[in-house]
Image (cartoon, rainbow, N blue to C red):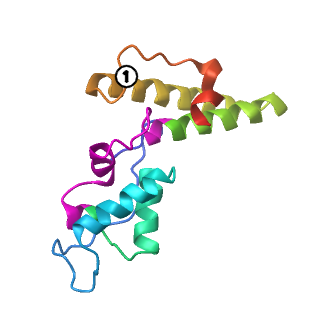
Amino acid sequence: MARMHSRKKGKSGSHKPLSRQKANWIRYSDKEIEMLIAKLAKDDKTASEIGIILRDVYGVPDVRMLTNKSITMVMKEKNLTKELPEDLIALMRKLVGIKAHAVNNKQDMTAKRGHQLTESKIKRLIKYYKESGRIPVAWKYDPTKLKMYTE
């Protein structure tokens, strides 16, 4: 898939295993994995952090292969999702960092361009999430209140 602003193709990234069957060395059942996801979500972990913890600590290679659900679907079933999606919050955190950098480095035009591109990505993502119903239609994006969203 092409990158959003650079017109280049992305080459790196992880690949899922070819086998779609449960490996015999996995010692957790699907109910146990769902309980682990719920426990980690209650500890304020995001879906990507939960996936990394399950992979590195518990030896779960792929949650979807074992439970036929994604981590976010399990979190949604147990009402443990946050108000805003994880990727939107990450972009907002990035924008807060760029703004802090711009205060100290007023001549940095590359940072100014990065600010514009990140703001554009945020607005595009908000539009998508409003159309798909992940965030309420009445929710407004306010750039002056970015720190409140990211805390």
- Element at badge 1? helix
* 145 lies left or right of 128: right
Residue shown at the point (35%, 16%) measured from the top left: 137
Residue shown at the point (27%, 54%) measured from the top left: 70
The one of 141 and 45 positioned closer to us in this rendering: 45
Given the current orientation, which residue lies at the most extreme right position? Answer: 104
Residue range corresponding to the magenta coloring: 64-88
- Residue position for label 1: 127
Given the current orientation, which residue lies at the most extreme bottom position? Answer: 25
Say if the magenta span includes residue 73: yes
Amino acid on which the number 1 mark rests in the picture: Lys
Q: Is residue 134 above or below residue 13?
A: above
Choose top left, top right, bottom left or bottom right for residue 126: top left
Q: Is residue 47 above or below residue 107?
A: below
Residue 12 visible within the image: no
Q: Quadrant of the C terminus?
A: top right
Residue shown at the point (49%, 26%) measured from the top left: 120
Residue 116: x and y in percent read: 58, 26
